Image (cartoon, rainbow, N blue to C red):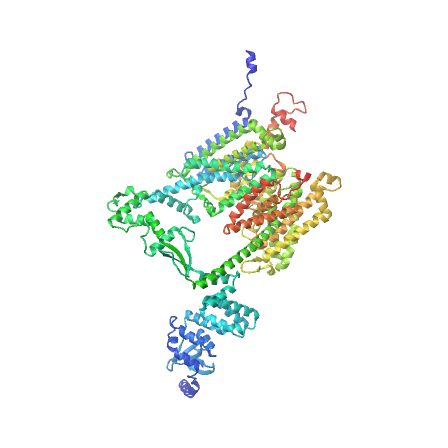
Amino acid sequence: MTKIFQRFLFCLLCLLGAPALAQEADAPIQQLLQHHGEIIAKSSRKTIAPAIDALAASGLPAAQQVLERWQAKEMWRDETSGLFVFAEEIDRDTLRIFDPANGTEIGAVPDEGYKQLKPNSGIRGMIGAALVQFQLSAPDPVTRATALDAIERDPDASHLLALRNAVGNESDPALKARKARLERLLTIRFDTDTATRIEAIESFAGDPAVDVRATLNPLVATRIEVATAAPQGDDIARILSVGSDALPRAAAYALLVEDGLVAPVLSRAEKRAALIAHLRDGAVGGYQVAQLDREDARDAAYAKLAETGAVAAVATEAEVSAALDAHVFYERFIGAPPIVARAALRALDAIETKVNLNRAADLVLDALSLASIYFLAAIGLAITFGVMGVINMAHGEFIMMGAYTGYVVQQVIPNYTVSILAALPIAFAVTFLAGVAMERLVIRWLRHRPLETLLATFGISIALQQIAKNIFGTQARPLTSPAWLDGSLVLNDIVSISYIRIAIFVLALVFLALFLFVMNRTRLGLEVRAVTQNPRMAASMGINPDRINMLTFGLGSGIAGIAGVAIGLYAKVTSEMGQDYIVQSFMTVVVGGVGNIWGALVGAAMVGSLQKGIEWFNPSNTLAAQTYMILFVILFIQFRPRGIIALKGRAAEA
Amino acid sequence: MSDLTLSAPTRRRPLVLRHPSVLVFLVVLALFTLGVTLLSEGIGLGVISTSFIKTLGKTLCFCLVALAMDLVWGYCGILSLGHMAFFGLGGYAIGMWLMYERTRRIIVDSLATAELPATPQEISDGIASQIFGVVGASDFPPIWAFAHSLPLQLAAVIVAPGLLALVFGWLAFRSRVTGVYLSILTQAMTLALALYLFQNDSGLRGNNGLSGLQNLPGLDLVPQSTVSLWFFWASALALGAGYLFCAWLVSGKFGSVIRAIRDDETRVRFLGYPVEGFKLVVFTLTAILAGIAGALYYPQAGIINPAEVAPIASIYLAVWVAIGGRGRLYGAVIGAAFVSLLSSWFTGGQAPDLKIGSLHIQWVDWWTVLLGLSFVAVTLFAPKGIGGLVDLAARIKSPNRHGADLGPGAGALREREADE
């Protein structure tokens, strides 16, 4: 009973509310929608474009909201009157509808008479593109930036006008610059006026940014065409000679075949297939199958077949040559009008020069950073090798030990900045102690037996490596750098250097300075130099050579530990990481010269820049770079067996 | 009459009499080979499995390369850390033929059923795409030019390591690079070779290496148990011949000169000997020996890849020789056999785990640590290595003179005692 009453009441309400449901059917936006009503309702990607364009170009204040609601599938159509409304679903079968003209609420209605517009993803994308022009002048700078991002990702001719309109009233200078730049890029791509395009192209001369090149490259696209005589015309980019890199002989002939100018040349496989297809009673073209195990026999058999007309004739080598000689091959601009294309070519040339210069600068930075890593790795070695004449093959394992110390410290101290700052001295202490222990236990007893020192330290190296593997496992452990070392210093699209590499470079400089200070300005340095030059004389002057040797070895090992932390920051920490650096470190010391910090510096610079230099010629292959670098060092030793900076006098005899 | 006998040159006694250790070694090797053959699976009682025959054969090859290492290091004083590069080159040289020939037979068989008989070009293309497909190439690199010919590749087993050693040695020795510098340089050489081979466009299948080498082309019907014995015998023969050759080489004047170079290079040079020439000969000869050992090793191992010539392999070679006792040929052989067999026993997981209190030591993990530390211990406390035990035994047998004059006729004993 109550249910019936409620229904009655609802109907009554509806009747009463009818005047309120009326909407402005003659509002301009509604008229526009009605004008395109059929294609909007059809909602097909192929036909929808005029409706969206009309909305976007209408200049009506409500257009933006209509597009947004439409995109969000919130636009419905009254099936009886054909009017469009915005609607929200209150529950399964009731809608709250709004007037598209001004967004005012009309009321709640049952959804039976309304049909939701469901634009598919393609149409939503088109609507999104149309919306960009509204977003470009949105009050929120973030929205404007997002709109610019969207245009950069997927530029369209329709954006050009919107951008041009939006540049003038932009208040944010950074955004204004971006808009202006983007406007010029779009001008190059989409403007119809040649002079404007050329002007925009010329404004980019020498700009090495990637997006400029990406914009210009399609303009200079060419197509290879063929003619019997040298063509005339402005749009001829260049005449190609057959057999050059740009046009190999086979490609040129393929072009002729494609144009139907000559008979094709069959590949071996095709010829073989044709012969097989015409096999009759174990013979083809007058040849027995058993005879066809040579190419010339197959050619002859095919020629016989062609004579009988069973297969198409193929061109002989002489015919191919004649056909190629009779034709001229040239490239025609197809990406843009010739005058624009030529301007783009000129701009690209200028950019190319600039890019190469920048690449060279980037290479120098790379080489510097690699050199500073090698320097850090080799400086400890230079101390022990140069000062004590001891080859420490476990040096790489001290580097690893330092890196693992850093890893362990990071497990204890969660703050990355603090843990790195703490890891440096702790790594130094750990490897210093390990070095002192090694000197005391092993190296001291092998004095004057350098080859056996080398072997014994090898034994230690093998053992340390395996111990690390047993403790930390075989997988790489991360040594995370603090956030302020993340990212890189980007100068432009080509030149960039990560902050970690800068930090390593600075660290290398610090150690150079520290080492020079210790050796030249402290008592310890004085004693070390004395022991290096003449241990017996130093001993008779009251210096304890054993103590000095121990401290020197500890110092060298400690620096290896710090190098390990630095290297661990940008490379993974594994038990084998020492091996990656040990040979390069030795190369550095041997090339530079023993017993001299400047030697290690020069050696590191040389080995680092050499390796990067070789990579420059063959960028895909770092293995080859290392191979050639080692070969070079072996040859280099021929000319300077004692390194670039060799010790002179008696010290060199040791 | 008596004048005649006096004027006749005193004939040197045969090598085996002057050095009884050579005879002992050869007899032991022969008995060992015979014993293994009798116990083998292929033709004997079947006590020793085929895989262990292969292990033993490979060990014999290690012994041969250790001999070479002993000659260059123990006798000539050149601590080469690159001899496994020559070993690997020998393996690559023979491996190229094995792989080429085996693939060729497979390709010819598969093309035999085609409608048209295969042309040489088709066969060659088929082999190339079969071998180099893994590195994305389908053409034969120039270094495979001789891979079709067994004699030429056998020659390459000798020529490739020999030539590399000759060029490298000539460069290194003429600029008077000695001692630790030379060691590092040889290590750099083997690293450079390994890095080069790791590239895919090196023409030797990059880090895939050459594989399937255990199958002898055309002998598919012969079981591996028999093939393994053939290689075992060949390895034993090579080791015996190599030992005899090395013993002969070091017993004569040549041996004296290279030992002198080891002890005091400058003095030998001042005496007028061409030190560099001697070193170069030793370096090249030992490289060839290593190449031959490698050519015998890799068909038994079945696969060779660039990791085999990584610097660490050559370091292990030095470890074997040092533990066995350098400067004596049997020391090198003992060291290589002992350490490599022990190593495969420990790393093979057969060694029982050690439990000390709560510490649970698994030898698979800790064997390398033990090896490294015992190597340090040997260097520190027993520079003569295992071979030094022979000296100890000999001294126990030798007469105790209680400080009396050595007297005439004591020969070598006198020299040694005066040394101490």
- Quadrant that contains the N terminus of chain A: bottom left
Q: Would residue A443 be seen by someone viewing this image from the given angle?
A: yes
| Tag count | 0
Q: Is residue A440 above or below residue A35?
A: above
Residue A191 % position (x, y): 46, 68
Q: Which residue is at the front of the view, B252 or A172? A: A172
State the residue lying farthest toward the right: A541
Q: B375 or A60: which is nearer to us? A: A60
Judge whether B36 appears above or below A107 on screen: above
| Above or below for A335 versus A542 | below
Residue sitting farthest toward the top: B1
**Picture coordinates of residue A124 (x, y %)?**
43, 71
| Quadrant of residue A445 within the rendered picture | top right
Q: Residue B375: in sight, yes or no?
A: no
Quarter of the picture holding the C terminus of chain A: top right
Please state the horizontal and vertical placement of residue B151, each as a whole percent of the image: 42, 35
Residue under the point 42% across and 51% down = A244
Residue B272 placement: quadrant = top right
Relative to residue B283, is residue B113 drawn left or right? left
* Residue B56, horizontal then vertical, whole percent: 48, 37
| Residue A654 position (above or below residue A415) | above
